[in-house]
Amino acid sequence: MSNEQATTSVSADEAGLADLGYKQELRRGMSAFGNFAVSFSIISILAGCITSYAIALNSGGPAAINLGWPLVGVFVLCVALAMAEVCSKYPTAGGLYFWAGRLAKRNKREWAWFVGWFNFLGEVAVTAAIDFGAATTMMAFAALTFGVDPNQYNTFGLFVVIIVAHGLLNTFGVNLVNLLSGVSAWWHIIGVAIIVAVLWIMPTHHQTFSWTMTAWHNGTGWSFTPFVFLMGLLMAQYTYTGYDASAHVSEETVNAAKAAPWGIVMSVVISIIGGWILLFSITAAIQDGSPAGLDKLLGTSTGLPPAQVFLDALNNPAMAKFLLFIVCGAQFFCGMASVTANSRMSYAFSRDDAIPGSKHWKKVNPRTGTPTNSIWLCIVLSTLLTVPALFNTTAYLAVTSVAVIGLYIAYVTPVMLRRLRGNSFVPGPWHLGKASLVIGWIAVAWVILICILFVLPPTWPINIDTFNYAPIAVIAVAILAVVLWFVRGHKHFMMHLDKEQLTIDESKLLDEIGD
């Protein structure tokens, strides 16, 4: 793209943003590839597939891993496609909550408010979970390499170092974020290629194709096979999150109405393909495929079954550590991208006066063009959310369990509202055409199903350590959103809706604000 074309594109982006009611404040310097890379980095197949591998291995085994990944991927792609179509129409940093407010036929501000709080707190929880997961994996690497004895204190300390580093990297400006996002994307692609190649070249034994795709293992305590398989799908569903990031950085992306939806969709497509190749390769490299062997893998002292697969299959500790190092790097990049998306969403939400102290969080650093205060707000909140890990892992998992289900509630709400608008919705330059109807309702149905799965108990018997705390976390977020709405939201929250969408009282309030 020439300088003249780039200038024209940026001008068009700024005009489009003005039509949506906002002034260009963030620095628009992110390419289409950089936009894609942010979402691809947060999905992070090298992080999600590795850290969540035990979920599917315990609940269905290889069948849940290698049949479940593409199955979930197809439905997640429907969600991504439906979201991308709406993103093309409304390419703003607010993303999901703004879409909900524009698409709802009644109570627009309430729809936007509740979607915004689920999105905001879901992203805070995701950032906490990603960086604490990165710290846990790095401590496992340190234990294997340097003999460090991991405990809750040094793991939490490393978590703080990691998340502060992510805050600093995001503070330095969008050009650095764009550069590092590109590095992250290639790290993931090349990293997967290296791990896959090593796992096929070095081991002397591999499982058969049939075993790798269909072998069954059930360590959940439940006996109903379809239920066990469905719970095993959560491994993939936990990994396929964060692709709304492309929308949150759209105000920093050139030609956002096309590049942001492209980033959403392609991040999922590449993850489906790359993740499937990675998971198949790891599973095929399992040396002992007996039930006892799989149980031993689940109980590995490394805490990560794939890391144990590296050690067993390669019979080369140095190479196994190198592969784990690649995973550590991917998790670091994943956390950095998560902070980027989280801070942009909170900046936009504060711009509409939704978060207490909004006047501070909506400020943009004039030197770097980044929402510096918002970045550090997210860092602090994610750190506070992780403090329970110092005392009780179950408590930590309870407070972060809202991450995925909260995000998917936020994902599907504007998709459902768009479908209810029918033909009155005028799509943007990137759209699904006649396929929009079918894809949209498949996306809605799938999210309803996974939200049910997320709140069911994954193992039996149920006790304080195996109890699924997700319903409590979701209810807590809903109660918080209700309380904040009546305390301040109904007075202060006024996102930029179309004039014809507003009630008479709301329209008067906007005029007063304008005066």
Image (tube, helix red, strand yellow):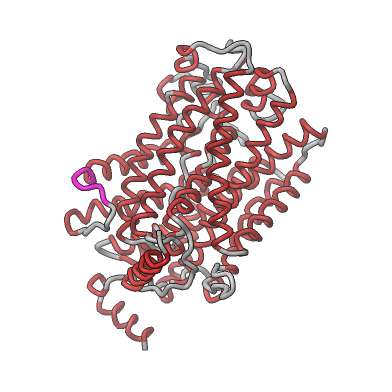
Q: Which residue: 50% across, 52% down?
A: 122
State whether residue 61 appears in this view. Answer: yes
Q: Main secondary structure of the magenta part?
A: helix
Q: Which residue: 53% across, 56% down?
A: 178
At which x and y percent is residue 500? 22, 73
Q: Which residue: 52% across, 17% down?
A: 217
Seen in the image, is 52 located left or right of residue 296? left
Q: Is residue 347 above or below residue 259?
A: below
At which x and y percent is residue 6? 40, 64
Q: Is residue 37 above or below residue 206?
A: below
Seen in the image, is 30 located left or right of residue 10? right
At which x and y percent is residue 468? 53, 38
Q: Is residue 435 magenta?
A: yes
The total number of labels drawn is 0
At which x and y percent is residue 223? 47, 18
State whether residue 113 appears in this view. Answer: no
Seen in the image, is 2 located left or right of residue 135? left
Q: Nearer the viewer, residue 294 or 396?
A: 294
Seen in the image, is 149 located left or right of residue 357? right
Q: Specify the quadrant that holds the C terminus.
A: bottom left
Q: Which residue: 35% across, 44% down?
A: 79
Q: Which stretch did the figure color magenta? A: 431-436
Q: Specify the quadrant that holds the N terminus.
A: bottom left
Residue 69 image-quadrant placement: top left
Q: Is residue 71 above or below residue 414?
A: above
